[in-house]
């Protein structure tokens, strides 16, 4: 029995350290390659969305995308939840809602128009552009602006938010 156990242990050892083992930890180069591939796929998705007439929702949640093309118009909802987005293009128009929950974004562009709700929960938003237009509610919980200002102050700063503002 001892020899059979030894053989099984040797087989397990070789399986763990083989290059094609799916359970082998990824190297830093593998992780970098995967992120580059994910970024390329996210950018392709944006280009296909634009090519197809910018109709419907655009979901880029949990992608490494950091920016979007200029003059983007989204014919539905724009989901960027948990993405690496750092900036939005000037003049962005979203016919639905814009969800930036759990992203590193720190500011919004001028002339931003959102027909639905705007969710900025757990972002690094410091201020809102005075010409911001939101037809629905704005959610600002766990943001620097919500910690620094009252809801009444934010409403005065952004009269273009037609719905309620929540912290």
Image: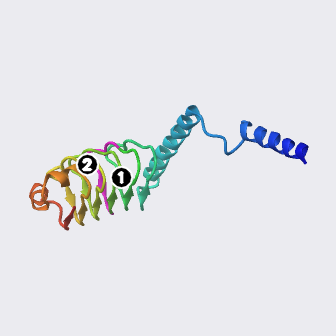
At label 2, counting other C-alpha atoms closer than 10 Å, the crowd grade (few under 14, some 14-19, many 20 or more) is: some
**111 left or right, relative to 84:** left
- Residue 76, given in percent of the width and then of the height, sits at 37, 62
Residue 90 is one of the magenta-drawn residues: yes
Point out the image quarter for the C terminus.
bottom left
Q: Residue 102 got which mark?
A: 1
Q: Secondary structure at mark 1?
A: loop
User: Which residue corresponds to the image point at 39% horizontal and 44% vertical from the top-left?
Assistant: 84
Residue 142 or 52: which is nearer the viewer?
142
> Residue 137: which quarter of the image?
bottom left
Q: Residue 26 got which mark?
A: none
Q: In the displayed image of the protein, which residue is found farthest to the top?
A: 29
Q: Residue 91 got which mark?
A: 2
Q: Secondary structure at mark 2?
A: loop
Residue 37 or 10: which is nearer the viewer?
10
User: Which residue corresponds to the image point at 90% horizontal and 43% vertical from the top-left?
Assistant: 3
Q: How many marks?
A: 2
Look at the picture and state if 89 lies above or below 77. Answer: above
- Residue 121, given in percent of the width and then of the height, sits at 30, 57
Q: Which residues are magenta?
A: 86-96
First reached walking from the N terminus: tag 2 or tag 1: 2
- Residue 158, given in percent of the width and then of the height, sits at 14, 56
């Amino acid at each position: 029995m001892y020899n059979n156990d030894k053989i099984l242990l040797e087989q397990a050892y070789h399986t763990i350290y083989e290059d094609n083992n799916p359970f082998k930890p990824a190297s830093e180069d593998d992780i970098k390659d995967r992120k580059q591939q994910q970024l390329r796929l996210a950018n392709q998705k944006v280009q296909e969305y634009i090519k197809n007439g910018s109709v419907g929702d655009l979901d880029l949640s949990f992608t490494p995308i950091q920016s979007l093309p200029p003059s983007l118009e989204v014919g539905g909802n724009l989901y960027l939840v948990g993405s690496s987005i750092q900036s939005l293009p000037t003049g962005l128009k979203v016919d639905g809602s814009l969800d930036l929950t759990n992203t590193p974004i720190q500011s919004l562009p001028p002339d931003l128009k959102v027909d639905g709700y705007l969710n900025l929960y757990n972002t690094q938003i410091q201020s809102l552009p005075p010409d911001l237009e939101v037809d629905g509610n704005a959610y600002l919980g766990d943001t620097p602006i919500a910690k620094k200002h009252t809801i009444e102050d934010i409403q005065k700063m952004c009269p273009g938010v037609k719905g309620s503002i929540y912290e």
